[in-house]
Amino acid sequence: MAKIIALGAYFYQALIAFGLLIIVAHWLAPVDYAAYSLFISLSQFGAIAAFEWVRFSCMRFYPGQTAESEAAERRTIVAEAAACALFCLVAAAISIAFGVTPLVALVGGLVAVAQGCSDLHLTMLRFRQDFRAFSVLQGSRATILAAGTLLGALTSPTFLSTVTGLLGGYAVYALLAALLSRRPGPRPATPLDMARVKKHLVYGSVSAGAATASMFAPLALKAIFTSALGPSGAAGALLALDLLQRPFVLIVSALQAIQYPEIVAAHDKAADTPALRRQLGQYYALLTSFALMMAAGIFAVLQPATWLVISPDLQAGFLATAPYVIILSLARVLTQIMLPTPLHLKQRLTAIFTLAAIDCALLNLGALAGGFLVARTDAALMAGGALGAILAALIGLRLMAALAFDFSWPPVLFAAAGLTVTIFAFVFSYQSAFVATAAGIIIGGGFCLLALDRLRLGMRASDA
């Protein structure tokens, strides 16, 4: 039940984030929205670059087997987080030399610190199995940050006011997190162990480098669009990237957060056994099926949803690039989260980073090739990026052979059929929007229900 509640918190966060982007895109002018989008990407990139190695170490070593090990890991993680926060603020100060205004640099640095620290704190709660506090804080963070952002945009519909409201939301959330996550009783006093810090640094740095490369990929893609089309011309494509990547990352990350700890425990207990191969196959089928169903669901409602919720000024650019963003997001979420699983289990750190670097390079080289070889339009640039993401995913599929697994095909095939139907429905929706959309929802939804049923039967069989 606790895991189901935690999964619900992820879905709630996704819903809030989706609604927030829609409202902000309506309230801000295209130039201000483009600046807001780049600011969010840069602050996320800074948080990942600074804090992700600590979070990966937390996922691998925290809390340990005893109260003493938990205290030692917590002491180490807190010290590492403080050092990372200082690094973020120094980087923000350095950015002033490259033309960033001092106020924007300060807000950006503080937002990056707040995001990195809050993500790390939520990870500690999840791996400590404190799902109640995790669920409350995960949902509260989404609500408070959305409220702060909207309050800033409502006060003054400008980029700076909006991101200042976001920073205020982080301040309120920090107070709430400090109150709700307090634990009664004394905690063991533990000195900082530099050997433990070194262990964290060695393990976490390569995984964090891969995460940084993955985060840098869409940031570079946004820079390509902005430089090629200008802030106003790129606004629709940037909104598509902001809106349509997020659901994929959240659903697959949520499923991974619930299932992955059991995979790690099974692998560490007895690697390469029939039971582990079946468990891995079910895990891969679960992530792949839900990613395909997410793509099918977005395609099914893309046309009417664009008319209803996207600002008229951005609809043309959004619809021109959205189909390619969906395919790009589907390929990248599997490349980032599912495909490196055997590499993480076997701790093949070089291969983990190499795959992330290949994904980043092919995504952006594909976009540049689309602009130079086809046309300098938003659709051509995004189509090239989607092709690059697919090529990177194909390379990642080869790396999955590092650990044997028994893949469960039926749910994936049903989900892929649902996606195919909704793609055709979207293509024909330009001729008969209502009929094609209804057909896509009904027929594609039917295939997705069959995929869910096969997943249910597979999980029941594995539990028996």
Image (tube, helix red, strand yellow):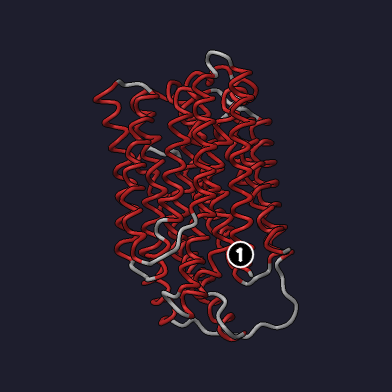
Query: Picture coordinates of residue 38 (x, y %)?
Result: 46, 37
Dot 1: what SS?
Answer: helix
Near-viewer residue (172 or 137): 137
The residue positioned 52% from the left and 60% from the top of the image is 282
Asked whether 329 or 150 is in front, the reply is 329
Q: Residue at x 51, y 38 (%)?
A: 417
Q: Using the image, determine if residue 35 lies above or below residue 400.
A: above
Left or right: where does residue 407 sit relative to residue 227? right
Q: Give the amino acid at mark 1.
A: Ala
Kindly identify the residue that appears in the image at 52 percent across and 55 percent down: 113
The residue sitting at 59% across, 68% down in the picture is 124
Q: Is residue 172 something that shows in the picture? A: no
Residue 332 visible in image: yes
Q: Residue 185 sits in which quadrant?
A: bottom right
Q: At which x and y percent is residue 390?
A: 36, 42
Reading the image, the residue beneath label 1 is 461
Choose between 394 and 356: the one closer to the eye. Answer: 394
Q: Which quadrant of the view contains residue 63? A: bottom right
